[in-house]
Amino acid sequence: MISIAAGAQHSVAINTDHKVLLWGANRLCQLSYSARVKEIYRPVLFSGQLDAISTRQFIAHDKITEDVMFENLKYIKVECSSSITVAQINQFPFLLIWGNGNQTAWSKPDILQKQPTMFRCVGIYVYVLTFEGLFYKIDSAKRTYTKIEEDADDTMDGEVL
């Protein structure tokens, strides 16, 4: 395994073929399956479903067609919290987020023009440190982000990056 992460009730790993494996509870779609699937007891491959907006952004940026979109995609790192899963990939948009009631992966490509230096999940939030030294908080429930300034008093629910 290249990377492994554990949420409160689900786990995620990346194998040596750079594919994502998921297992555990799926009540909030954190395994990328419909909420009707409550739990998966053995590791399964991530389906790779992207929402329509992320798919269009992915294709427009890389100037590729949808049928080859995942051909060269490699997963690098995974993180998860109690309700979401985040995977870092080797190409734009670099981070895919799913869970919190939504089984399709999505991204915020406008904040990442290069690979993120670091990211961490806390509850419904993803904290991202960019290559340029910018720090963002992505709200997975609202699908919005906030740039965190150096002098801002934003605790990370007790978590440390």
Image (spheres, grey):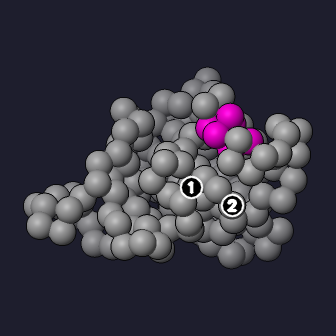
Q: Is residue 160 above or below residue 73?
A: below
Q: Is residue 52 above or below residue 157?
A: above
Location of residue 145 in the rendering, given as x and y in whole percent from the top left corner: 35, 45
Does the segment drawn in magenta span residue 10?
A: no
User: If the image is split into quadrants, where does the N terminus sit?
Assistant: bottom right
Residue sitting at x 37%, y 73%: 133
Tell me the amino acid under the disc marked 2: Gln
Per the rendered image, the range of residues in magenta is: 54-59
Q: Which mark is residue 91?
A: 2
Location of residue 139 in the rendering, given as x and y in whole percent from the top left corner: 35, 43
Residue sitting at x 48%, y 48%: 110
Q: Is residue 12 in view from this perspective?
A: no
Residue count near mark 1 (Cα–Cα under 10 Å), binned few <14, some 14–19, many ≥20? many
Residue count near mark 2 (Cα–Cα under 10 Å), binned few <14, some 14–19, many ≥20? some
Is 142 placed left or right of 46 in the picture? left
Secondary structure that dominates the magenta span: helix
Is 32 placed left or right of 130 in the picture? right
Is 50 placed left or right of 80 in the picture? right
Quadrant in the picture for residue 55:
top right
Quadrant in the picture for residue 76:
bottom right
